[in-house]
Amino acid sequence: MADLEDMVRELVIALDGARKVACLTGAGCSAESGVPTFRDAGGLWRGRDPMSLATPGAFAAEPELVWQFYDFRRATLEGCLPNPGHRALAELEGRVPEFLLATQNVDRLHQAAGSKRIVELHGDIWTLRCSARCGHEAEDRRTGIPGPPPCPDCGEPLRPGVVWFGEGLPPGAMEGAQRAAGTCQVFLVVGTSSVVYPAAGLADLAAARGARVFEINPRPASRVAGIRVLAGPAGEILPRVLAGLRARQ
Ligand code: BV8
Ligand code: ZN
């Protein structure tokens, strides 16, 4: 297998020649910021599988428990800052003519690092919205509240503004991400186990339309045919890629 240095060089050359670049990121992109990944080995919370808590059914059945799961994650995030991988992706956005970052992350660390061209496929943990869909939705960074606060407009419980399993993605999110994946010359898959759909399907779409697909992950997971793998942490590899690109531009 080509060594990492060769793969970094190959990615730099591909990025330098590309008009359109798109990227899918997952929890691994925030790991070096101290944010536990979604499926960390044994990633249980109070003995519960997060996958079973991130559902509308769980919120309906155990609203306080689900609320406290998200409150715990929001409180964990309070001390977390963007890492060099987030910053490298923000710089890349300014170094290619057209760039789109589709993230599965709900932590807003890409925005904090300066990324502008971004689609949040799975929503945002800092936004609270009305569980009765009355239309109320607002950024709310309070933590330590024991249960879902009442919607200020209709009194029903508020819920985290994230997309739960079994819920549709935000209107237009996948369409925008698919348009970018389907027309880019280079597609990056960074820090994701590529098990959650429809997000994971973006890499397949990019490859099917002829893009060069590269994965950055210490434990590469994508099954896209012909994918080029840079096996290592995003916070180390992406800055090396940007250093190489800077030297050519
Ligand atoms: C939908 C928000 C339909 C909440 C999340 C059977 C087959 C196929 C699909 C399905 C199926 N059964 C059900 C489905 C659909 C389901 C799905 O895909 N399930 C999977 C699990 C089988 N999908 C859905 O339900 C989606 N909706 O399909 O709706 C529909 C349509 C219209 C109308 C109604 C319904 C909704 C999916 C969204 C779920 N919400 N999150 C929250 O965060 O609490 S998903 C959740 O998983 C997180 O968003 C997370 O981002 C996402 C993916 O996980 P990853 O980001 O990949 O994180 P993970 O921990 O898994 O992996 C971390 C990776 O990082 C690892 O590979 C690791 O090696 C790497 N890493 C570690 N350190 C580093 C690193 N990489 C780089 N650098 C490092 N330093
Ligand atoms: Zn309401």
Image (cartoon, rainbow, N blue to C red):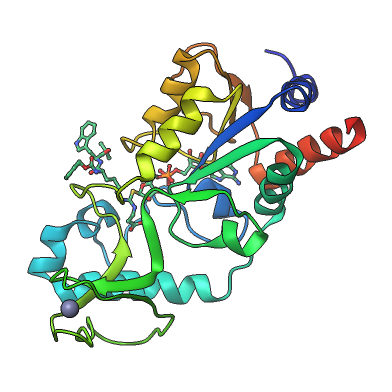
- Hey, which quadrant is residue 160 in on the image? bottom left
97 to the left or right of 151: right
- Hey, which quadrant is residue 248 in on the image? top right
Residue, far left: 61
What residue is shown at x 37% (from left), y 57% (from top)? Answer: 123
In the image, residue 109 above or below residue 198 = below
Residue nearest the viewer, comparing 109 with 6: 109
Residue 87 visible within the image:
yes
Residue 193 visible within the image:
no
Residue, far right: 247
55 to the left or right of 124: left
Q: Position of residue 210 (x, y in %)?
A: 53, 13
- Hey, which quadrant is residue 201 in on the image? top left
Q: Where does ligand 2 appear, by image quarter?
A: bottom left
Q: Position of residue 121 (x, y in %)?
A: 39, 48
In the image, residue 14 above or below residue 1 = below
Tell me the quarter of the image containing the C terminus.
top right
In the image, residue 243 above or below residue 74 = above
148 to the left or right of 132: right
What residue is shown at x 52% (from left), y 61% (from top)? Answer: 35
Q: Position of residue 149 (x, y in %)?
A: 23, 85
